[in-house]
Every structure is written in structure tokens, then in C-alpha cells.
Amino acid sequence: MQDVSVLPLWRCLERRGGADVYVTEYFRVHRDSHPDKEILRSITDFPGDKPVIAQMIGNDPEHLLRTTKRLQDQSDCSGIDINLGCPAPTVCGKLSGGALLKDHNLIREIVETLRPAVRGTFTLKTRIGFETPEEFEALLALFASLPIDGLAIHGRTVREKYQSPVHTDCIAHAVKTLPFPVTANGSIVSLETALAMHRTTGARGLMIGRGGIRNPWLFQQIRDAFSGNDSPSITLNDVRDYIFELRDEIRETGQFDSDTHLVHRMKKFTNYIASGIHEGEFNYALRRANTLTAFEAICDEHLCSDEAFPEYPDDDGKLFCGFKELVA
């Protein structure tokens, strides 16, 4: 969740219950890299005492080792996670992220190089293959032999990106096969999809990205469901408060020299938050706002209401896709 899984968002999530564990944006690692200061602040300035995992992306074991040591020296991160799942062409073109799934020997070298240096948990984030799900069996054999503490599985291939149903059967197979905890990821956008993912896979944990940006109450709703408690209903007024609070948190970073710049930054979040509200009209209007005054007026027009916040986003094949199949 590069550019959106950031400290200002996390602060807003925490006020609504928040996740049990947070994972940073990925630190890009190469020969000349240093830990990004803004991402590092997600760890050092995080409110409270929940675990924060430092995520890295790269393909050189020695550079990853150097960065692991620096991250642990410069922060109190609870663990290290290596990204083997990012499908972005610019990442895969550098033989990082999801492209590493094509080189099992390099994955092993990375893990065995880093393992002695990692002080906390050491985990991997993967997809079920690069081209096809048929690659997953060999990947499972590899992962089972590695000295790691857990595996998060996005139930799609790299080629499928985010535009296909999630292969929950692959995640369920991994849960039964691997000797360490498995976390399920992919198209968890609501309480119903979260419960369905847990029921169909048996995964130890759920990793939530886009769905948690859209619905910051989702983490607490899931905990309430597992503990047998009812969650309070969410209204559009609540969503308006969330957006304006996020605006204030982002503005307080001091990174924006104009309101217009701030508005364009906010759109990275409202693209998710507005999905499903008023049949796309709200998001359509926000995307065309160029001033903070216009942005806020559009929020007031669409959100000053006790109308219930829709449980589901738009199934548009772009930002959100495949969640209907989880609960079918």
C-alpha cells in the first residue's frame, strides 16, 4: 500500500480501533539506498505500543542485510518483512517484489542471509505464483523449508494483479501445509468478506489494505464479531469526520506548500473511501476538485447525513474487485 499506508492514516485508524499489527510501506533497498525518513517515522512516531513491522523490497541479500541492521538500529520495529508480491511493472522490472517468485534460489539466499540479523519476527509477503496458480505447490515447498516466522499470502498471481477472484483454496492449502502461521490477504473489504476469508481458509490472521482505508472501523468490527459483540452502525457523517480528520493529519506533516497540493494528496485516499457512496457521483466530483474549499463542499454535500455507510465499495474492476466471490 505504497503512498497510502502512512502514519497520518494510521493515527486515524487507531482512533477507530485500528489493526492489531501494522506493516510499513516498503523501504526500497538497493546499492545506494538509506531507510526512507518518512517511512521510518511510521515506526518511531507511531502512537501506542502495537507492533509495527518494517517491510523491505529489493533483491540483493547484502543490501537487504545492511538495511535490516539500520532499521533495527534506528527504530524499535517489531520485525522485518520481505515483499515477494508487489505486481507493479516498475518493481518487477527490477527483479524485485513479485518477480522474485521466479527465482527460488535467490529467495532462499535472502532469507538465510537475513535470518541471523533479524531481532524480532521475520516474515514474507507473497502471491501464489508469478504466471499461474500451478506454481504455488513448488513455492509452498520452498517456504516450508525456510527459517521464517510466518507468511502472508495474497491469493492471486502477480499477473492477475488485483483484477481476479482470490484463490482461497491456495491459501487454505498453505494453512494446512506450512509449519508456521499463515495470514490471508486479498479483497477483504467488509466484515462479511473478512469472516468468509477466515472461514474458507482457516488462516491465523487477516491482512487488510484497501478495505481498511475505505472503512477504518473494519478492524474493530472484525474483533467485535469474533468476540460476539455488536458494532455500532456507521453513517455518512462518520465518514465525513474521518476524511476531515485525515486531512488535518496530513496537513500537519508540513509537506504541502498549498491547499491544492493537499487536495491532490487526499484524493489518493478518497478514491478508496468514496467508493460505493452515491453510485460513484461522490468520487466523480472529488476527483475534479482543485481547491480545498471545493473538496470540503463536496464532502459536505454528500456526507452530511445519517444515511448508513454502504458495506461494500463499487465492484469496478479497478480499485476493488473479486470480493463478491468471497461471499458467494
Image: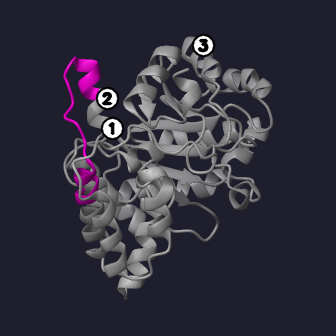
Q: Are marks 2 and 1 in contact (CB under 8 Å)?
A: yes
Q: Which residue is mark 2?
A: 222
Residue 43 belongs to the span the image colors magenta: no
Figure disc tally = 3
Q: Is residue 129 left or right of residue 246?
A: right
- Tell me the residue at 53%/36% (across/down): 187
Instruction: Give the vertical position of 106 relative to 243 (above or below).
Output: above
Task: Return the residue nearer the eye: 35 or 130.
Answer: 130
Spatial CA span between label 2 and label 1: 6 Å
Instruction: Give the vertical position of 206 relative to 163 (above or below).
Output: above
* Picture quadrant of residue 222: top left
**Residue 147 rendering spot, x and y as whole percentages:** 55, 28
Query: Which circle's residue, 2 or 3, is located before the other in the chain?
Result: 3
Q: Which residue is mark 3?
A: 177
- Tell me the residue at 65%/21% (across/down): 170
Q: Which residue is mark 1?
A: 218
Dot 2: few (<14), some (14–19), or many (≥20) neighbours within 10 Å? some
Dot 3: few (<14), some (14–19), or many (≥20) neighbours within 10 Å? few
Look at label 3 and name its amino acid: Thr
Look at label 2 and name its amino acid: Ile
**Residue 316 rendering spot, x and y as whole percentages:** 60, 47
Query: Which circle's residue, 3 or 1, is located before the other in the chain?
Result: 3
**Residue 22 rendering spot, x and y as whole percentages:** 36, 45
Q: Are marks 2 and 3 in contact (CB under 8 Å)?
A: no
Look at label 1 and name its amino acid: Leu
Q: Which residues are magenta?
A: 223-241
Secondary element at image label 1: helix
Spatial CA span between label 3 and label 1: 29 Å
Say which of marks 2 and 3 sits in front. 2
- Tell me the residue at 73%/39% (across/down): 101
Looking at this rendering, what residue extends furthest in the bottom direction?
257
Secondary element at image label 3: helix
